[in-house]
Image: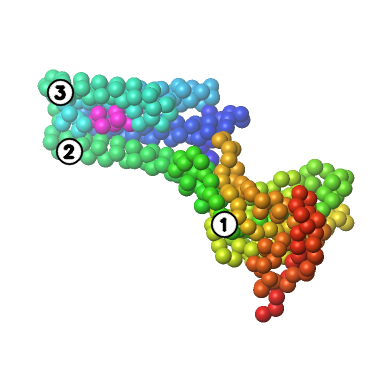
Amino acid sequence: MNALSFFAYDPDDTDEDQLAKTTVFLFAGACTIAGVIWTVMYYRAFGWGLTSFLPSMFVFIVVGALLISHFTRNISYAIYSVIVCIIYVTSFVQWSIGGLFASGFVLAWAFCGPIGALIFFPFRKSVVWLLLYFANLLITMSFDDFFARNGQVVDEETQRLFFIMNLSFSSIVIFVFAGYFVSIASRERRRGDALLLNTLPREILPVLKSGQKTIADYYETSSILFCDIVGSTPLFSDMEPEDVVDWLNEVFSMFDQLVEKYSVEKIRTIGDNYMVASGVPSPRVDHANALAALALDMLNGLKQLPEREGKRVNCRLGINSGPVVAGVIGKSKFQYDIWGDTVNVASRMESHGDAGKIHISASTYELIKDDFECEYRGATQIKGKDELETWYLVGPKNS
């Protein structure tokens, strides 16, 4: 399809503009080819006359409109010319041949006009073209005897050939363009879903698309991880903005891969802070173990990343476990988020921890102590809380 973007090309075109121009060219081109075929067919059947002249006039008008649209970069000329010619030229061809049966129902092609209008115009405007088609169909049915008496003499074998060609080829054209737009709609739907999945969990997407206005759930047990880059201000102060973004992208992309590996949910990034939830929105009994393994891999992953200008990224990590409320907020820009004291304590675990270490709460420790080595830190004064017993996660226990 990209090879057809030359038609009415404008460097300021959006993707939607290019798609519209490509579609116009394909639609008009297909109808033009059909016009040439029918000109030859009618010439061989009836000789040169009104019946063979009409489809050739169709070709001349449509090709001329395409050229005008191409050089003016305005596809309206082509759109209106094609739709008008499809509806009226095919009607005149049928009337010049005779009745419905003698012509092989040439008017079947006229239905491509409303289909084209539906492609390029809003639905209400397309209805006008559909009514024009039905008006021509009504005229044909009402004066069918008159057209039959004053039309061409067509033998039964030629009538059957006309029926086969008109119905089959017009159906093929309609089917191809319907399939083309169904495939485009499917592709755009997949693209939209992919964009939503960048901000929403996969499990939430069907609920959102169902039209449910408020999406909120309570999770009795889950684990929350916060990760923050230590000393980011002096670390990035003498770097170019592009280098800072590139470095953060390298770090967070590595984190994203690990999140996928452990099937947990990335909630958001804020500046140089990274937040992950486990057990939300899909409950799991090993939510704390999954985040513990993730946190250890995140630290190991940072060590494996190459230095930049002699500098290396270091992080503080904090984990807490407990109940949370999760849901979607926003009307036009959706955000899946989680709330509750569990989240607040997880954030405090990170901010009151040490660089290069994973600071965990007592609730998380109780869930992972059988599978992971932990170092008791003692009673720690936490901002906004009383003293809490906390631990540092060291690594997995040997089996």
- How far, Cα to Cα, is label 3 from label 1? 75 Å
For the question of whether residue 199 can be seen, the reply is: no
Numbered tag placed on residue 160 in the rendering = 2
- Report the residue marked by disc 1: 220
Start-end of magenta stretch: 106-113
User: Is label 3 in contact with label 1 (beta carbons under 8 Å)?
Assistant: no
Q: Viewed as shown, does residue 122 lie left or right of 297? A: left
Q: Secondary structure at mark 3?
A: helix
Q: Amino acid at mark 3?
A: Asp
Q: Viewed as shown, does residue 209 lie left or right of 338? A: left
**Residue displayed at 82% across by 49% down:** 232
Give the mark, 3 or 2, whose residue is nearer the N terminus.
Answer: 3
Q: Residues within 10 Å of mark 1 (few under 14, many from 20)?
A: few
**Residue displayed at 70% across by 50% down:** 344
| Color scheme of the displayed model | rainbow
Q: Secondary structure at mark 2?
A: helix
Percent coordinates x, y for residue 259 in the rendering: 64, 58
- How far, Cα to Cα, is label 2 from label 1? 73 Å
